[in-house]
Image (tube, helix red, strand yellow):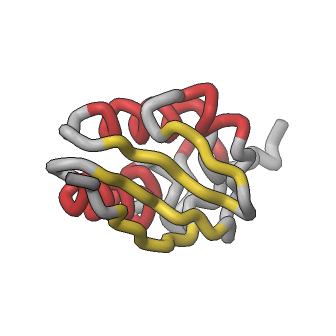
Amino acid sequence: MTDSVVRQSVVVNNSQGIHARPADLLAKTASQFDATVWIEREGERIDATSILSWLTLAAVEGTRLDVCASGKDAHAAVAKMVALIESGFEEIGSSSEPSPDSTPDASH
């Protein structure tokens, strides 16, 4: 029996895009499911469980990604990955408020 592919598009909304911390979080999340999870962007396909593959996507804010999966947990995997990307990776500074460390100090 062939597993069907579950696919959903999502746009990266984190102002810093997908850098090392989100790549690690996304790879670990993709690894938690009994499914093969991959990402497609403009004809390129990457293994969603690989941190290095996430980084090679160079996905900046506004990048459209297709989250895809096949296997027993395909629906759950796609839903979780899309929710994580839409959340801005739950990072400080992914909202419109700057983090205390990133605010320029004009007094120096």
Quadrant in the picture for residue 25: top left
* Residue placed furthest toward the front: 1
Residue 41 against residue 22 in the figure, above or below: below
Can residue 80 be seen? no
Q: Is residue 100 left or right of residue 6?
A: right
Total numbered circles? 0
Which quarter of the figure is the C terminus placed in? top right
Near-viewer residue (103 or 53): 53
Q: In the rendering, at what x and y percent does residue 12 appear? A: 57, 64
Quadrant in the picture for residue 68: bottom left
Residue 78 against residue 62 in the figure, above or below: above
Can residue 50 be seen? yes
Residue at image x 67%, y 59%? 41
Residue at image x 51%, y 57%? 94
Q: Is residue 7 left or right of residue 63?
A: left
Near-viewer residue (107 or 9): 9
Near-viewer residue (85 or 52): 52
